[in-house]
Amino acid sequence: MAQVKNALLRSGILVVFVAISLAGALAQTDPLPSWNDTAPKKAIIAFVEKVTKDGTSDFVPVDQRIATFDNDGTLWIEQPMYVQLAFMIDRVKELAPKHPEWKTTQPFKGVLEGDMKAVAATGNKGLDQLMAATHSGMTVEEFEKIVTDWLATAQQPKFKRPYTQCVYQPMLELLAYLRANGFKTFIVSGGGIEFMRPWTEKVYGIPPEQVVGSSLKTRFEIVDGKPELLRLPEINFIDDKEGKPVGINQYIGRRPIAAFGNSDGDQQMLEWTAAGNGPRFMLLVHHTDAEREYAYDRQSSMGRLDKALDEANQKGWTVVDMKNDWKVIFPPGQ
Amino acid sequence: MAQVKNALLRSGILVVFVAISLAGALAQTDPLPSWNDTAPKKAIIAFVEKVTKDGTSDFVPVDQRIATFDNDGTLWIEQPMYVQLAFMIDRVKELAPKHPEWKTTQPFKGVLEGDMKAVAATGNKGLDQLMAATHSGMTVEEFEKIVTDWLATAQQPKFKRPYTQCVYQPMLELLAYLRANGFKTFIVSGGGIEFMRPWTEKVYGIPPEQVVGSSLKTRFEIVDGKPELLRLPEINFIDDKEGKPVGINQYIGRRPIAAFGNSDGDQQMLEWTAAGNGPRFMLLVHHTDAEREYAYDRQSSMGRLDKALDEANQKGWTVVDMKNDWKVIFPPGQ
């Protein structure tokens, strides 16, 4: 019996030893290794630890841990122009041979000649025409393929890498950290919902059903005996500014407890998040790194951060200073 | 050492014994105990086993296991009228003291006097007026409370129990069985999205963000310094018939591999589901049980099942004969 006891004791000691090693390894693993040890990182971790600690008044049940992220400028690059705008320009060039009239008609002429001032002069009407010509007139599945094919070859001009590699490594870590703590992560973007859904799961770990964005109307139709969804040249929903809380309510149906953005287009989403009961976390990414990425805020034509920055400073929302708070910007090259 | 070996051997035998008992218990646990052992139950189980068996050509990865369910008549009762219509009538009665003019104005007069023919005579315009008066003019949070309070006291007239207990026990089991096999379950209903979201998680285990439905427009506004979402008297989206595949694409962004309905309003959802690649499962609940629930199909004013039934019979979709295929209809009384 002594031997049995001894064997059991030894295996017991082994179990305890393994448990201690694991706990040590876990404690030593930094969930946000690409973040410098500055205020934003500390604020994120303090918030997550607070809402996940059972038995306290700040504890938030798992099903209410909703976190929403803007996409352009928050999760991936938005300079020198929104990626979807680059896509649109390339689409016009690709389709131009079938539309000889575009050579002489704005806004297409401007796009083909690289005269963006002429394009801008056509205003919203011109943009609608460009959207219709490049984003509608096909099935949803055909559009998914067009987007996927384009992203496979298009390159961001400054960094000469695919746009899907111009995503922010610190934000990828943040998404994973939140999910590891029971959060459900959503994208809430002014960009096109069907421009994002083909790749967000692979790149961010966010499945299509957790992507909220702007959209065109679609129509169900039986084409040659086959049910199809056709993309129409008509705006369905603009998920920007006041549209973001509307989109959150429409798609998610609950108020987030944490929201992440980078521009005035995200201000209302952060306000809506902040106005709920219990612990709240609001963060803005401030693009301050002209060398490693871009530096822009109040005067920018894309991703303008002005009023939201004032409100963040006034209300104590977390502001990431990209240059000082992030160790790296993009994932390691592949 | 012999004793150690003996002890280890014994514990080994114990482990094997426990494992065998557990396997036996699991094999004997019927995942659909309220379903009779007829064709629909067999078809459901065969489908789930097929798509979850790794290494076969029919295997479907977990993230693509999307199942969509109609609500009225598929998950809960829809007779003698849609539950939301009963809610609307009660709301008119509750609000009437503040609107003396309703006593003499259709469609309100008809609702107050129980003259549904007069209400019906006002057509879509009348219905829009009723919707506006009962479903808009408050914040989304106020409406959530109104719905929750109403459901806490309202009773289904035939069965004298709350509507949330007039849900179909066999369908609750089916939802749980699918989720246990890695499916993500969604509601895709013609009913109001904000009429369902307050209770679907508790009753069906389906969280708000997995509920797709019809909706009114909302507007973000700062009221007395507080951000609010106000419900407007304007239709945003009708999630019925051709609208169901549109809603699925808009909200979920992927095609379901299984879809469940009970009326012609679900026909396009089932067609859209059926038209995808790989294994597919389409099911219609046919209300054939006048005694335990209701019997209705081709001639019904609510939940009419006519063309979809023909298509199901023609294409071999599964049709549940409620009377013969379900052992019980509702959950045990509470």
Image (cartoon, coloured by chain):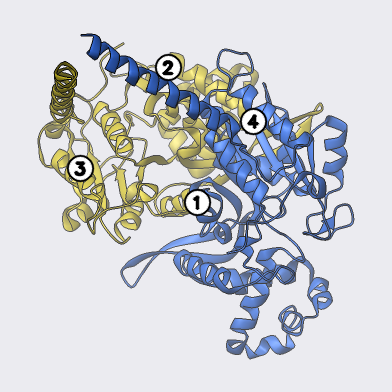
Chain colours: A blue, B yellow
Q: Is residue A270 visible?
A: yes
Q: Amino acid at mark 4?
A: Ile
Viewport quadrant of the N terminus of chain A = top left
Query: Where residue A156 sits in the image (x, y, percent)?
Result: 69, 69
Q: Earlier in the sequence, mark 4 or mark 1?
A: 1
Chain of the residue under the numbered disc 1 shown in the image: A
Q: Which mark is residue B154?
A: 2
Q: Is residue B79 above or below residue A68?
A: above
Q: Which residue is mark 1?
A: A208
Within-10-Å neighbours for mark 4: few <14, some 14–19, many 20+ = many
Within-10-Å neighbours for mark 1: few <14, some 14–19, many 20+ = many
Q: Which residue is drawn at the image coordinates 37% and 36% (left, top)?
A: B71
Q: Is residue A61 above or below residue B260?
A: above
Q: Which residue is drawn at the image coordinates 72% and 72% (left, top)?
A: A157
Q: Amino acid at mark 1?
A: Pro
Of discs 2 and 4, which sits in the foreground? 4
Q: CA distance from mark 4 to mark 1?
A: 21 Å
Chain of the residue under the numbered disc 3 shown in the image: B
Of residues A136 and B130, the one nearer the viewer is A136
Q: Amino acid at mark 2?
A: Ala
Image quarter of residue A153 = bottom right
Within-10-Å neighbours for mark 3: few <14, some 14–19, many 20+ = many
Of residues A31 and A115, the one nearer the viewer is A31
Q: Which residue is mark 3?
A: B44
Question: Is the same chain shared between marks 2 and 4?
Answer: no
Query: Where residue B179 sits in the image (x, y, percent)?
Result: 33, 36
